[in-house]
Image (cartoon, helix red, strand yellow):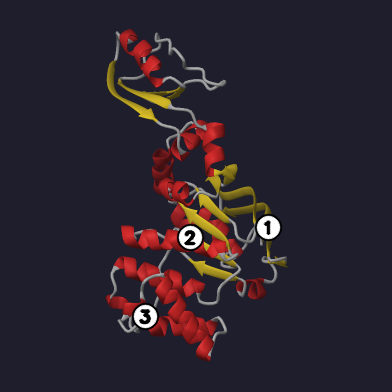
Amino acid sequence: MLHIEALHKAYGKVAALQGVDLDIAPGEIVSLLGPNGAGKTTIVSIIAGLRRADSGVVEVDGLNALSRSSRVRRCIGLAPQDLGIYPVVSVRRNLRLFGELAGLHGSLLRSRIDDVAETLDITDLLDRQAGSLSGGQKRRLHTAIALLHRPKLLLLDEATTGADVETRGHILDLVRSLATDGSAVLYSTHYLNEVETLGGTAVILDRGRVIARDGVTELIAAHAVPVVEFTFEGGVPDHIEYDGASTQGRQPMIDGDRIRVPTHDPARTIAAVVPQITTGRLTSLEIVRPSLESVYLALTGRRYDEADREGAREGHDVSAS
C-alpha cells in the first residue's frame, strides 16, 4: 500500500531525511518512532503531498505520490499533529464539511458520521460546538475527520499529543481495528510505550535515517540487553574495570559524567563496580531493563529522552520534520 525508497529532504543545511526506505502492506500497522527532529513529520507530510521531497520514490496503492498527489489524497486519511477543526461550528457540522470535501454526500455521509462518532465515543458530542470541547475530545474529533472516507492508508502523526488517557486508549484501539479491517496504518509517535502497546512493526528513525525495523518483540530480542547506568560527580573514574561489561560485543558507553554498561547480569556488574569507586562520587545508579528504550540506547549510545530534548533544542520538529 505504501512504498518509500531512498527518500531525501533537507531544509537549508539541515538534512531531515537521509535515504529513508519504508514499506507498509494492507492491514499492517507500522509505528514510526523517533525523538523530536528524527524526521517523522517530514515523512508523513511528503506522503500526504504537503511537502516536496528533494529526491526518492513515494508510491501509494501503486500511484506516484510525488507527481499525482491529487489522486493519492483520495486513498489517504491524514490526522496531522496540529488540530484541524472549525471551533465555531458543531462537531456534526465539522464532520459533514470534511466528509463532503472527501466526496461523501447524503445517506452515506450520515452513516459514516454515525460510525466514526461511535468508534471514537463522540456521539453524545455531535451537537456541541467544537470549540467548547475538552482537549481530548477535540483530538478525537480531529482523528474522526481522517476516517470518514475509510482510507486505504491512514497517516496518524503524533495522534495522542496532549490527549488524556481515555482518548489515548480510544485512538490505539481504533488503530488496531482499522488494521483488522484491511487499512494500512502509519502511526508516527515519540511515545515508546504506545509502540510497545500496539505491537506490530516498529521503524526507528534517528537523525533522518532508519536505524532499525522489525516487530517490537523481535527488536527487543535482537538489540536490547539490560544496561547499568552509573552517574558520577566530576567525571567517570578511569581506573574501574567493568565486570560483565562486554555483552555480545557491546562495550561500555561513556557520556559526560555517565557510563552505561550493557550486561546480562546487572547485579553482578553493580557488585563488581561499586567497591572499586575510590575516587569521584557516585551520584546515581539505574538499571535500564530490555525495552524499546534499551534498543535505542544500544543502537545510538543515547537515552531516548536525551535525544528528544536534543531535537527540541535544535527546533527540528517545529521547522524541519
Disc 2 and disc 1 in contact, CB within 8 angstroms = no
Query: Left or right: 284 with respect to 76?
Result: left
Please state the horizontal and vertical placement of residue 285, each as a whole percent of the image. Answer: 31, 24
Please state the horizontal and vertical placement of residue 84, each as a whole percent of the image. Answer: 42, 72
Callout 2: SS: strand
Disc 1 and disc 3 in contact, CB within 8 angstroms = no
Cα distance in 3D space between marks 2 and 1: 18 Å
Q: Does residue 128 appear in the picture of this structure?
A: yes
In the displayed structure, would residue 311 be above or below residue 273? below
Cα distance in 3D space between marks 3 and 2: 21 Å
Question: Which quadrant holds residue 73?
Answer: bottom right
Query: Left or right: 193 with respect to 56?
Result: left
Q: Which mark is residue 91?
A: 3
> In terms of sequence position, does the residue under pointer 2 or pointer 1 come before the other?
1
Q: Which mark is residue 157?
A: 2
- Nearer to us of marks 3 and 2 is 3
Q: Does residue 321 appear in the picture of this structure?
A: no
What residue is drawn where x is 54% and y is 47%? 202
Q: Which mark is residue 251?
A: none
Q: Depth check: 132 or 196 in front? A: 196
Q: Which mark is residue 3?
A: 1
In the displayed structure, would residue 254 be above or below residue 202? above
The amino acid beneath tag 3 is Val
What residue is drawn where x is 39% and y is 63%? 170
Please state the horizontal and vertical placement of residue 15, each as a whole percent of the image. Answer: 57, 48
The number of callouts visible is 3
